[in-house]
Image (cartoon, rainbow, N blue to C red):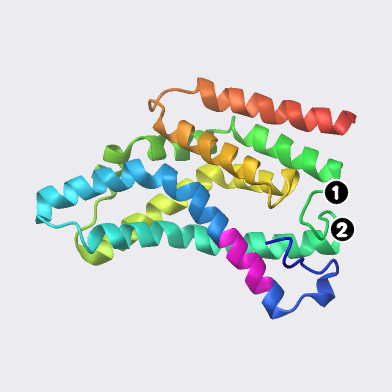
């Protein structure tokens, strides 16, 4: 994408087409990175729907759509943030990071967030599909959509800081996208009380941020 089109370096030079293309990029990235981690929840929900109503559609589709909608809305915020970063020259026209201090701050904040009770609370809900569905169950199509929004919001609360790392390593860094996707997936499939992996990731983020500050 960056080879065919590059966003303007100045905020006043952005046109609607630039916002649209950047938003489309983030929307596709968020869907590709976050839908794999939602599969365990969607499969459990589909099984319960099959048992209770003898049907899966349209409930699972609505649940998945609502989950994805949360990340599509978050993509608007990421688009606006990227617009400002180009204006501040934190990002190059190729969407690579060119401010090591900003990258360091992002890594440090993401590392700190890994240790917060808020992160842990959201993560526990993501790790327990059955527990979430038992406590948040709503009947009907409207209920499916509401549960999808609730799960998407919890997932966003859990993973937003990890998504911000894309600004630090280069927005179009496909290797980073793959690694963050795997990281999020591993975090969510581990046993509900397992904290070692998340804390290790937090230490790595903090270490990377401090290392960038010392360069």
> Foreground: 4 or 166?
4
SS at badge 2: loop
> Please, which residue is most extreme toward the right here?
215
- Dominant secondary structure, magenta: helix
Can you tell which quarter of the image residue 111 is in?
top right
> Foreground: 24 or 165?
24
The crowd level at tag 2 (other Cα within 10 Å; few <14, some 14-19, many 20+) is some
Q: What residue do we see at 80% from left, 48% from top?
A: 97
- Residue hosting label 1: 98
- Does the residue at mark 2 contact the one at mark 1 (Cβ under 8 Å)? yes
Vertical relation: 5 (above or below) 170: below
- Residue hosting label 2: 89
SS at badge 1: loop
User: Which x, y percent locates residue 130?
Assistant: 26, 39
Give the residues in magenta.
19-27
Q: What residue do we see at 66% from left, 38% from top?
A: 110
Vertical relation: 200 (above or below) 81: above
| 96 lies left or right of 182 | right
The circle drawn on residue 197 is: none
User: Which x, y percent locates residue 82?
Assistant: 73, 60
In the rendered image, the quadrant that contains the C terminus is top right
Vertical relation: 194 (above or below) 129: above
């Amino acid at each position: 994408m960056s080879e065919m089109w590059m966003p303007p370096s100045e905020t006043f030079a952005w046109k609607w087409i630039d916002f649209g293309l950047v938003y489309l990029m983030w929307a596709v990235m968020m869907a590709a990175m976050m839908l794999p981690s939602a599969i365990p929840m969607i499969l459990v929900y589909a099984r319960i729907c099959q048992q209770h109503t003898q049907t899966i559609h349209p409930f699972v589709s609505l649940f998945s759509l609502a989950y994805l909608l949360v990340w599509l809305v978050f993509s608007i915020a990421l688009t606006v943030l990227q617009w400002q970063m180009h204006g501040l020259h934190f990002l190059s026209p190729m969407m690579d990071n060119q401010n090591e201090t900003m990258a360091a701050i992002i890594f440090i904040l993401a590392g700190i967030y890994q240790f917060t009770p808020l992160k842990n609370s959201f993560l526990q809900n993501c790790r327990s599909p059955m527990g979430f569905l038992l406590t948040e169950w709503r009947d009907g199509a409207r209920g499916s959509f509401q549960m999808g929004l609730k799960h998407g919001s919890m997932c966003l609360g859990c993973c937003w800081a990890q998504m911000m790392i894309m600004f630090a390593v280069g927005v179009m860094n496909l290797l980073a996208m793959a690694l963050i996707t795997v990281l999020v997936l591993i975090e969510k499939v581990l046993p509900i009380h397992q904290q070692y992996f998340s804390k290790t990731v937090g230490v790595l983020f903090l270490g990377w941020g401090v290392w960038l500050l010392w360069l």
